[in-house]
Structure formats: structure tokens, C-alpha cells
Image (cartoon, rainbow, N blue to C red):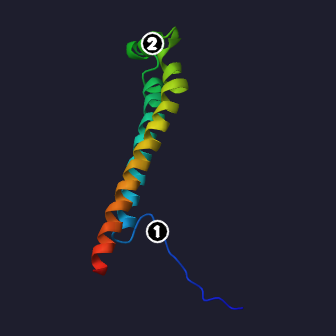
Amino acid sequence: MSQPKNSHQVNLFRPKKGHMRDEVLIILAILFGWGVCTFGFQLLVYLCQGTGAGSLLTRLTLFNLPLHFWFTGQLLPLWFIVLCVIFNLYIDRITEYHSRRRDRSYE
């Protein structure tokens, strides 16, 4: 009835070598790309408010919508999908690399 306790510790700031370290680097890079696009443009619009550049950002239109509205409503969801595809491609590549490496170590 009593099962041995296998505790698995995962720390995002101190990952173990190998697969976990590569995976954490990809996660941090994707989060950085997401954060820059999500908050960077909005921060730019807010900081340029009242200057000539701020009014330019709100006056520009794309498909008859203000640029900042199009960026937030259309481009960010597309960017999220692109980031998901990039993440999955890199995770597959990392998993394949470490699987081959692990298989070679058994020979």
C-alpha cells in the first residue's frame, strides 16, 4: 500500500543540465517575445500620447481601423499562434536531439 515517494523538483531559475535547461531557454525566449509585443506597443502608444508621434500612431489606419486597434485585435492573436508553432518546433527538435544523445550513451 505504501508507495515510495519520488519527488521531482523543477526550478525555472536553476534548471538541470540537458533537456530541461534547453527547454527553459526556449520558454523564456517565447515569453520575452510575447511580452515585448503585448506590452511594448501599448507602452509606446501610452508614452507617445500628446506628442506628434502619439497622434501619428492613433491616426494611422490599416484596413480602415486605427493601427493600434488592429495591432491589438488582429496581430497579437496571430503573433501568439506563430509563437506556439515556433515553440513546438523547437521543443520537438530539442527532444529529438536529447533522445539521440541518450540512445548513444547506452551503446
Is label 1 or label 2 in front?
1
Q: Which residue does the numbered mark 1 point to in the structure image?
A: 11
Q: Which residue does the numbered mark 2 point to in the structure image?
A: 55
Residue type, numbered disc 1: Asn
State the CA–CA distance, disc 1 to disc 2: 45 Å
Residue type, numbered disc 2: Ser
- Rendered location of residue 66, percent (x, y): 51, 13
Badge 1 element: loop
* Frontmost residue, 82 versus 102: 102
Residue 99 to residue 90: above or below: below
Which label sits on residue 19? none
Image point 48% across, 70% down: which residue?
10
Image point 46% across, 9% down: which residue?
59
Badge 2 element: helix
Residue 51 to residue 106: above or below: above
Return the disc, 1 or 2, that comes first in the chain's sequence: 1
* Frontmost residue, 2 versus 35: 2
Circle 2 crowding by C-alpha within 10 Å: few under 14, some 14–19, many from 20? few
* Frontmost residue, 76 versus 95: 95
Circle 1 crowding by C-alpha within 10 Å: few under 14, some 14–19, many from 20? few
Image point 40% across, 66% down: which residue?
20
Quadrant position of residue 53: top left
- Rendered location of residue 43, percent (x, y): 46, 30
